[in-house]
Image (cartoon, rainbow, N blue to C red):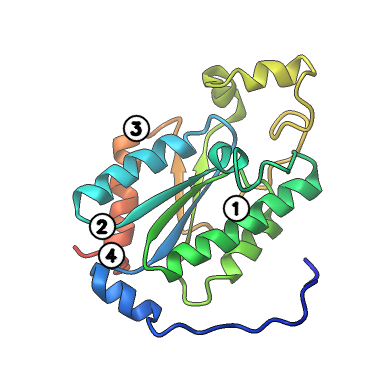
Amino acid sequence: MVTQKATNIRWHQGAIARDDRERLNSHRGFTIWFTGLSGSGKSTLAVALEEALYERGLRTYILDGDNIRHGLNKDLGFSPEDRTENIRRIGEVANLFSDGGIINMTAFISPYRHDRQTARELSMDGSFIEVFVDCPVEVCEQRDPKGAYKKAREGIIKEFTGISAPYESPENPEIHLHTDQETVEACVRRILDYLTRHNFIPA
């Protein structure tokens, strides 16, 4: 739990509410939280899904793990404590995007259940959709798009999820994808179907 350091502060309520922004956008603001091992396909799916949503005229934004670490979280490493803080910050940012009426997709390993639950609890209105991008570590290692598994095996990268650091699989994700068995297109169709059936986006 992060301690509140500033004390002489108060929440300032604007004149335009979330409902107003969603009405302007003609769709809800919500978070699609992709979680899975490195190389499982999180970023690939987020990009493909954003393209599909954009083609429908919906307002979107991707919060990608590597990109965020270039700016907002550039001061964080990969220790358990830094991983928790990384996800805490992005959970807050994702919640702001949702409040802004934007469909935001986060592509983070986010290995700890507790941290993902903390991010979920920021969305009190059910606007948090956890997508487990499930792929065996052997397949992820074969893909190894950044050469990270090889470096982890050689001891160059320490505390690497799936090799020298744990990954806690989601127990009850809204969507469970198997990217070693399903194509990107099939996965995107499944997500779009879920969003339509649950009235997150127009049919």
Q: Which amino acid does label 1 sit on?
A: Pro
Q: Name the residue under label 3.
A: 183
SS class, disc 1: loop
- Between discs 2 and 1, the one toward the N terminus: 2
- Between discs 3 and 4, the one toward the N terminus: 3
Give above or below for 138 relative to 183.
Answer: above
Q: Name the residue under label 2.
A: 58
Residue drawn at (64%, 57%) of the image = 89
Q: Residue 113 location, x and y as percent?
A: 67, 55
Query: Is 161 placed left or right of 128 in the picture?
Result: right
Q: Mark 4 points at which residue?
A: 197
Name the image quarter holding residue 71. Answer: top right
Circles 2 and 1, Cβ within 8 Å, touching? The answer is no
- Between discs 3 and 1, the one toward the N terminus: 1
Give above or below for 64 relative to 136.
Answer: below
Q: Quadrant of the N terminus?
A: bottom right
Q: What residue type is labelled 2?
A: Leu
Distance in Å between CA atoms under marks 2 and 3: 23 Å
Q: Residue 70 location, x and y as percent?
A: 60, 38
**Residue 171 shows in the view:** no
Give above or below for 98 relative to 76.
Answer: below
Q: What residue type is labelled 4?
A: Arg
Near-viewer residue (44 or 26): 26
Name the image quarter holding residue 141. Answer: top right
Mark 1 neighbour class, 10 Å CA radius: few under 14, some 14 to 19, many 20 or more: many
- Between discs 1 and 4, the one toward the N terminus: 1
Distance in Å between CA atoms under marks 3 and 1: 21 Å
Q: Residue 104 location, x and y as percent?
A: 42, 56
Farthest front residue in view: 8
